[in-house]
Image (cartoon, coloured by chain):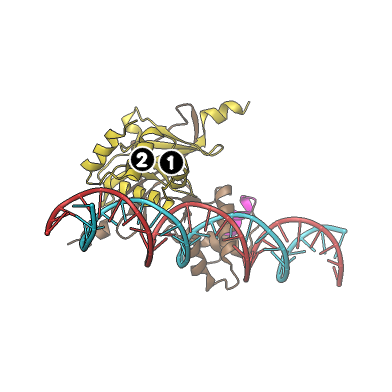
Chain colours: A yellow, B brown, C cyan, D red
Amino acid sequence: MESIKEREELVMHGISPSRPRVEILNYLHNNFTHPTADEIFKDLRGKVPTLSLTTVYNTLKLFVSKGLCQSITINEKQVCYDGQTIEHGHFLCSICGKIYDIKDNEEQDKPHKDYMDGHHITEVHYYYKGVCAECLSSLS
Amino acid sequence: MESIKEREELVMHGISPSRPRVEILNYLHNNFTHPTADEIFKDLRGKVPTLSLTTVYNTLKLFVSKGLCQSITINEKQVCYDGQTIEHGHFLCSICGKIYDIKDNEEQDKPHKDYMDGHHITEVHYYYKGVCAECLSSLS
DNA sequence: CGTGCTATTTGTTATGATTACAATGCAAAG
DNA sequence: CTTTGCATTGTAATCATAACAAATAGCACG
């Protein structure tokens, strides 16, 4: 895990590839669990002992502004982050609280437009709530 | 404004129609601004001087659980509330911060399914971000 | 090698939304 | 009138996030 890819990606986006930034981006590229800032912080502390939570927050905000990741606001409590920048939906399980990615194979399933009611649309977000497959099967 | 309709609606949903509850429901039915708990509290203080912010929070949570209103989590800072319970999208203006209702005239514009990837879907949420018509026109 | 400059990181402290909790109030039933 | 139980209230706690100032690191230049 040399994180060369992450280093390059940062530079291409005009961000200098400091240690914390490379590690956080690498983390986002390897974890599809939609982590919160705090989860990222706790998970990376072992690898980068000097890391501070403030840096995680700053870095994530920077990444979002540069289009390197997206923030997810399904959960009423905390913001979650997703290293996948291509538009896709999410599913929040009301029982276990996990967030799943939704792969939209059918195009018409997702809302799509540039203008609506005269507003200029730059981002489309959609998500579902319910009970996930795993929780469904344990409700035997 | 006798709020008889709200009184009835509360009773029909198994909620005893106390003064704060009637007033908050009435407020949600007359304001389509997607207010936060605090905005509702401040706006109703004149009319109901004994009202407490805690009651507003409790009541909103009760309403959501009984399906009398829905909570909107577009904004990363606070949760907003919407008295309209029929499924509809929202639009958040990144400039002025206002939230608009989106009337979906075209059915295929909104995602729709009962099951997806094995998960059981009970709620569908979607929203857009961008620049609203008003802010667009003032960018002259 | 040092020096200074700028960007980055860090720790601490503040903020602000939401909740927990305990106390008070109130309305219906006896 | 009392009792009983739910509603409401005020206060204090919690917790995510941001502000801020100090410390540090990377780097161009002498």
Residue A105 against residue B6 in the figure, above or below: above
Q: In which quarter of the image is residue C20?
A: bottom right
- In the rendered structure, are the residues bearing label 1 and label 2 in contact, judged by CB atoms less than 8 Å apart? yes
Residue appearing at x 31%, y 34% in the figure: A3
The residue indicated by pointer 1 is A44
Mark 1 Cα shell of 10 Å, populated few (<14), some (14-19), many (≥20):
some
Q: Percent x, y for residue D12?
A: 63, 66
Q: Earlier in the sequence, mark 1 or mark 2?
A: 2
Instruction: Write down the region rendered in magenta.
Output: B6-14
Q: Percent x, y for residue B65?
A: 58, 48
Q: How far apart are marks 1 and 2 (CA)?
A: 8 Å
Q: Quadrant of residue A8?
A: top left
Q: Is residue B76 visible?
A: no
Residue appearing at x 59%, y 62% in the figure: B54
Q: Quadrant of residue A107?
A: top left
The residue indicated by pointer 2 is A23
Q: Percent x, y for residue A80?
A: 43, 44
Q: Can residue B20 be seen in this view?
A: yes
